[in-house]
Amino acid sequence: MNARVFFFILVASLMLLGVVQTVQRHITLNVPWLPGETRTIWNIDARIDFNATNEPIIASLSTPDIQANYTRISQNAASPGYGLSFLDNDLTNIAQWTIREASGKQTLYYNIQVLEDERSTDKIIAELPALFDEEYTDAVFTANNAIINEALKTSANAFSLTRELLKQLNAETVNQNVNLALTHSANKTELLITLLNQADIPTKKIGALLLEDGRRRQHLIPLIEVFQEKNGTITSRLFDANLTAAVKRENLLLWDQSGTALLELMGGIDSKVSFSMIKQDQPVLSALLQQSENEHLFNFSIHSLPIEDQSLFKSILMIPLGVLIVVIMRVLIGLKTSGTFMPVLIAMAFIQTSLITGLIGFILLVAVGLFIRSYLSHLNLLLVSRISTVIIMVILLIALFGVLSYKLGLTEGLKITFFPMIILSWTIERMSVLWEEEGAKEVMVQGGGSLLVAILAYFVMSNEVTRHLMFNFIGLQFVVMSLVLLLGSYTGYRLLELRRFKPLVDGE
């Protein structure tokens, strides 16, 4: 294969790899494009109160399952002296407390954090709930049949039948059949479940929690989930026995989907469960980390490292952008710099010191260093000895400027210590040699070019958006690499070289 063709295939492959990895990370992991985005997390406490009867206690609390719009990111419980187990399976999610013996008033706490997540969906319904057998008196059975037959006339499926039944149950003037049925049911919810069951429509009782920030001592809202099978697909809708239309899921967390009981208690009496909640807005990445701390999502990425190491990589991962700026300025613009990538290292020092302080400190140190280096040039020292002397000199200068700025009350001057001493030493040595070989003008050209490129790299590398993108989308490193390789194949004129043709343009 032609080397040129292979080169462009390599560049295209790197670019494609970077773009695909970046887009995939955004779509599948929900990592945002821009910094500052937040996600809503609901912190919910369930409080269980009951009286123990000096017997072994088993308290089983149904907890939220997978559902649309909400994702559980953590759960824990406060239960001194009790054993605690989280029993999660395909059918139910349960927090279970156990103790050998207890007496008197008992209080257990269960806490869960759920993330508002648009990507979360309800579980696929594998099978319909079973119908149940219920005994009725002849009068109640006849009244129920009359109510069902009336609703069947104006309905077409399970959902519309449910709405028609609710219209009868919630009419301003209920008929005698509804009155008779209500006298033999605990409430409208139980009656609706009974009617639908008698009409061979599967149902399940649901306990839903209305999410409102700062609410305390709340209780679950009883809802009925009505199922319908069509063409082999099972669908369901939620209904409230006190309303005549399907329930909207907005701000509703389906807490108890067991279809049995919210709390099953053995060894205790007079139990009650209440809920308190608070709404928190957290940065997206913080929420994602909580959501995925036990998954593979971040286990093999920089996010799995300690915070101190993450902070280090946050700076290191910006170097490729600085390198790209240097390549653009040297290859396309034709700007001369002192050293190939010296401006990137200077820009990193500017990020630590701030731009103005860094510029002043850098110019002062290099100027004084050049003056002292000019004296050393007359001693005919070896390169290693000369560089070592310059390093010691730079350390002394940094210490001198630091103490002097502190005594003068200029605390910004203390930031000069962030400059890498080796970089300063090599910069002074390189400029000194350049001064001897090419003259002061070339030192000003290359030194000024280095500072200009360093300033441009500083603005790019310190930008909040670019720092967010480069740290959270590692694929962008491949994109930058492909651009650097592509610029490396450029053999045309630099922008600053075009001035050589100005006389020809003027002559025309």
Image (cartoon, rainbow, N blue to C red):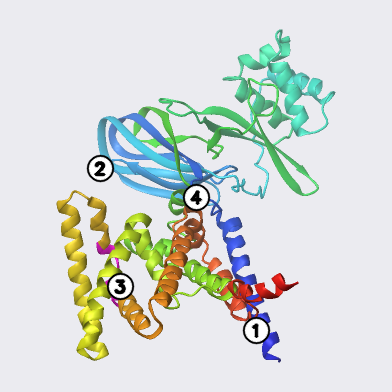
* Residue 397 is inside the magenta segment: no
Tell which tag, 3 or 4, sits nearer the viewer: 3
State left or right for residue 123 relative to residue 101. right
Q: Residue at x 56, y 27 (%)?
A: 222
User: Picture quarter containing residue 386?
Assistant: bottom left
Residue type of the residue flagged with mark 1: Phe
Q: Is residue 298 visible?
A: no
Q: Residue 158 location, x and y as percent?
A: 76, 33
User: Which segment did they paint magenta?
Assistant: 417-425
| Disc on res. 7 | 1
Q: Is residue 458 left or right of residue 168?
A: left
Q: Residue at x 62, y 66 (%)?
A: 19
Tell me the residue that label 4 is attached to. Answer: 35
Whole-number angstrom distance, CA of label 4 to CA of label 2: 44 Å
Provide the residue designation for mark 2.
Answer: 81
Assess disc 3: are there few (<14), some (14-19) or many (≥20) residues with their C-alpha within 10 Å of its C-alpha.
Answer: many
Q: Which of the two labelled residues, at mark 1 and mark 2, occupies the earlier sequence position?
A: 1
Up-down: is 378 above or below 392? below
